[in-house]
Image (tube, rainbow, N blue to C red):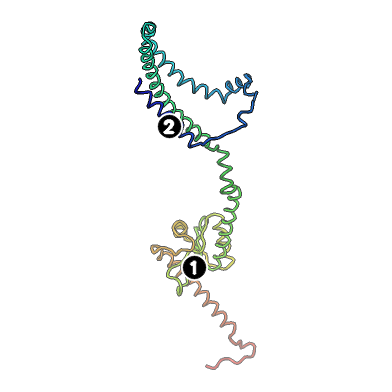
């Protein structure tokens, strides 16, 4: 026991000096002013037995119960020696008492060390839990950072409407519109001198398909019904991209049909124009010389 006292005293002095160096010497005159409310037992009892004060009191009872158990164990073990301690000499009694206190001190210190680690974990868990946001707070923060969902939805709808309007304007430049005929509509443009393959200018289904066909009729763009080709183009080719090579033959057949129909219409129009400009003998015009 005698060899254990100096290290403990030295450790206590080092700890006290470290606290002094860390915090410095602080003199607070206001702390010496009397505050009689601190001595009011009603206030102290209300603070101790309140909901906020009940938790620390319960937590302090747990290590205290372990300390009492250690003390009771030591006393029950040394009960006979305690009864006959009056027969010991002063030095022997002090040595015996110091051994008991040292045993209680290191066992109690271990209990408090373990409890401090557990209490630190509990406090950290409670602190992290208190920092968690509720669902309403998450929604409010999301509104502050990302904007109101209703406004963002309105913006998305507005952007979609603008994209559809721009797409409808592209239909006027289409070479042909291929339809399902009721569900899908795909507008293609092909300029042989400038394009290596036809390009999808617009596509849609349902109401959008009906609008594409209406725009095509308004701008006199040919409409061809080819359900398999319309479905494949709608599902595999994005707007503004060229058709894949596996669809070249099918699209070429449609374009050839369009070109033949346009050539026949042009020939008929030229024939009508030549017939309208030919001289009429009934009007007194001289017949052409043979």
Mark in front: 2 vs 1 = 2
Query: Taking 76 as reference, is 262 above or below it?
Result: below
Percent of width and height locating residue 167 = 55, 62
Single out the residue that lies furthest toward the bottom. 289
Residue at 48% in and 31% down:
123
How far apart, in angstroms, are the residues tagged by discs 2 and 1?
Answer: 88 Å
Q: Along the line of sight, which residue is nearer the eye, 230 or 90?
A: 90
| For the residues bearing labels 2 and 1, Cβ distance under 8 angstroms | no
Percent of width and height locating residue 195 = 45, 71
Q: Along the line of sight, which residue is nearer the eye, 290 or 107?
A: 107
Residue at 39% in and 26% down:
8
Q: Residues within 10 Å of mark 2 (few under 14, many from 20)?
A: few
The numbered mark, 2 or 1, whose residue comes first in the sequence reads 2
| Residue at which label 1 appears | 189
| Residue at which label 2 appears | 14
Query: Taking 91 as reference, is 12 above or below it?
Result: below
Residue at 50% in and 68% down:
175
Query: Taking 88 as reference, is 198 above or below it?
Result: below
Res. 170 image quadrant? bottom right
């Amino acid at each position: 026991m005698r060899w254990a006292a100096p290290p403990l005293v030295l450790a206590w002095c080092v700890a006290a000096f470290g606290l002094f160096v860390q915090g410095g010497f602080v003199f607070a005159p206001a702390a010496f002013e009397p505050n009689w409310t601190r001595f009011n037992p009603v206030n102290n009892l209300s603070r101790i037995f309140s909901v906020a004060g009940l938790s620390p009191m319960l937590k302090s009872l747990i290590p205290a119960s372990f300390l009492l158990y250690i003390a009771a164990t030591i006393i029950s073990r040394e009960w006979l020696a305690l009864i006959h301690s009056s027969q010991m000499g002063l030095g022997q009694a002090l040595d015996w008492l110091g051994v008991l206190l040292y045993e209680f001190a290191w066992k109690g210190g271990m209990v408090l060390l373990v409890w401090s680690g557990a209490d630190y974990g509990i406090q950290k868990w409670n602190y992290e839990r208190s920092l968690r946001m509720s669902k309403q707070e998450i929604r409010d923060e999301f509104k502050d950072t990302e904007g109101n969902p209703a406004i963002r939805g309105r913006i998305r709808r507005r952007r979609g409407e603008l994209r559809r309007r721009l797409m409808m304007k592209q239909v006027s430049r289409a070479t042909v519109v291929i339809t399902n005929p009721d569900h899908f509509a795909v507008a293609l443009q092909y300029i042989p001198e400038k394009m290596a393959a036809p390009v999808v200018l617009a596509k849609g289904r349902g109401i959008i398909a009906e609008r594409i066909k209406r725009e095509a009729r308004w701008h006199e763009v040919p409409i061809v019904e080819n359900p398999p080709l319309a479905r494949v183009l709608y599902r595999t080719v994005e707007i503004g991209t060229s058709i894949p090579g596996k669809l070249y033959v099918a699209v070429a057949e449609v374009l050839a049909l369009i070109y033949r129909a346009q050539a026949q219409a042009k020939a008929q129009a030229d024939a009508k124009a030549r017939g309208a400009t030919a001289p009429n003998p009934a009007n007194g015009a001289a017949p052409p010389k043979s």
